[in-house]
């Protein structure tokens, strides 16, 4: 059986996608350099699915290794997650972000061409829309100037892939994720933030667990119903399943153009305070939080119009915000 390559397959979204691929009967091979993941994730995946995926620990910037990999393996499709993703770090180290995120993508695309491999699913982000003028956000909303080098690598990666699909047989889908949260309901895999978390949910669960004394709510003077910023939080298992739907669409030649773009969100916006209260309800934990000033670079509100992805991929979310928060909490409780 031909294999699906998952780059960054030991990361947060990657590992959940590997689980769903294996549940669907796909054979998976992972390339991950362990820069922001742990080898134990492989065991978590194995515990859930009963099957250990093939794993190659190397860096996608090693062009020759990538070429050799595609020449010596029959790969039926690629899901490309591997990338650096810390917004603040990208502002401090822009060249590292451009080199890592764009260089590894270019090596993958070159490798795919050398190995006559097709198609690719790309891990993009709603960050390409910036603060959209119209909510909910549709896929044809204008792309805004990126707020950070990280965001810019997502935009540029989409363009690099799009140009490549025009000049080769490669077909692609970019999935623009809204805010992925949660963990696997078995608590075998989840998010593993390095150091102090930047994202809301890991900060919430670490505060509830007593690792952090207090959650700062960044701003309550936004033009939203309760003044706190609004996002579209999607359970990582639902998000993982969108990748399977996208992969099948391309493998079955059901795509309408060589490159397609889909928003992957729930379609529902939740404010920071709503998330805090949903967490307290779902877990019966009281959260110590304090309103502070806005975080630089944050937008007011973003949530997805999911009509296109629902129709074209035949995919929709099945899990609620409370499910995601409960699963994130159970995962947190398992961490030492
Ligand atoms: C952030 C990134 C975005 C990236 C995404 C990936 C920024 C500015 N944006 O999105 O580019 O694609 O992560 O997951 O970093 N919040 C608090 N207190 C906290 C943490 C967050 O109030 O301690 C608030 C934020 O102000 C925001 C919301 O919670 O309103 C969600 O924050 P976060 O989880 O960091 O996601 P985004 O900012 O949407």
Image: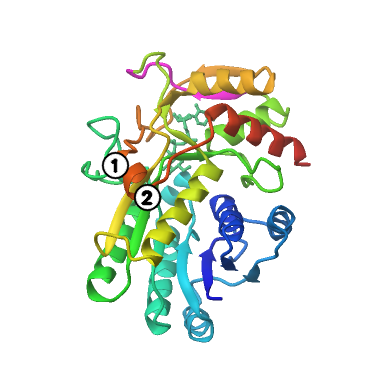
Label 2 or label 1, whichever comes before in sequence order: 1
Residue 238: horizontal and vertical position, in percent?
51, 43
How far apart in space, not on screen, are marks 2 and 1 (Cα)?
Answer: 21 Å
Residue 108 sits inside the magenta stretch: no
Say few, some or many: other residues with alpha carbon within 10 Å of mark 2 (under 14 / 14 to 19 / 20 or more): some
Q: Residue at point 69% right, 18% down?
A: 284
Q: Is residue 253 above or below residue 140?
A: below
Residue 129, numbered label? 1
Residue 93: horizontal and vertical position, in percent?
45, 55
Q: Residue at point 69% right, 20% down?
A: 285
Q: Nearer the viewer, residue 93 or 224?
A: 224
Query: To which residue does mark 2 refer?
Result: 313
Q: Is residue 103 above or below residue 314?
A: below
| Magenta portion: prevailing SS class | loop
Say few, some or many: other residues with alpha carbon within 10 Å of mark 1 (under 14 / 14 to 19 / 20 or more): many
How is this picture coloured? rainbow
Q: Which residues are magenta?
A: 214-223
């Amino acid at each position: 059986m031909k294999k699906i390559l998952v780059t960054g397959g030991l990361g947060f979204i990657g590992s959940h996608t590997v689980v769903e691929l294996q549940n669907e009967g796909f054979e998976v091979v992972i390339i991950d350099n362990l820069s922001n993941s742990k080898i134990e994730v492989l065991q978590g995946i194995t515990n859930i699915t009963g099957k250990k995926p093939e794993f190659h620990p190397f860096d996608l910037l090693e062009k020759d290794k990538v070429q050799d990999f595609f020449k010596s393996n029959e790969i039926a499709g690629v899901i490309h997650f591997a990338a650096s993703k810390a917004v603040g770090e990208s502002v401090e180290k822009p060249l590292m972000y451009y080199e890592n995120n764009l260089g590894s993508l270019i090596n993958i695309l070159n490798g795919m061409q050398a190995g006559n491999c097709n198609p690719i699913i790309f891990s993009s982000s709603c960050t390409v829309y910036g603060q959209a003028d119209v909510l909910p956000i549709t896929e044809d909303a204008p792309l805004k100037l990126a707020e950070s080098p990280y965001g810019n690598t997502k935009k540029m990666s989409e363009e690099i892939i799009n140009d490549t699909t025009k000049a080769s047989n490669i077909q692609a889908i970019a999935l623009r994720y809204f805010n992925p949260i949660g963990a696997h309901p078995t608590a075998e895999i989840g998010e593993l933030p390095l150091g102090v978390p930047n994202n809301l949910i890991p900060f919430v669960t670490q505060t509830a667990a007593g690792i952090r004394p207090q959650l700062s709510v960044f701003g309550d003077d936004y033009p939203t119903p309760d003044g706190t910023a609004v996002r579209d939080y999607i359970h990582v298992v639902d998000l993982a399943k969108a990748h399977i739907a996208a992969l099948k669409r391309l493998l079955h030649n059901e795509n309408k153009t060589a490159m397609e773009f889909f928003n992957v969100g729930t379609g529902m916006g939740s404010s920071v305070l709503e998330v805090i209260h949903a967490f307290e309800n779902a877990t019966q934990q009281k959260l110590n939080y304090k309103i502070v000033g806005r975080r630089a670079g944050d937008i007011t509100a973003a949530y997805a119009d999911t009509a296109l992805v629902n129709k074209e991929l035949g995919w929709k979310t099945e899990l609620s915000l409370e499910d995601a928060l409960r699963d994130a909490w159970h995962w947190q409780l398992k961490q030492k």
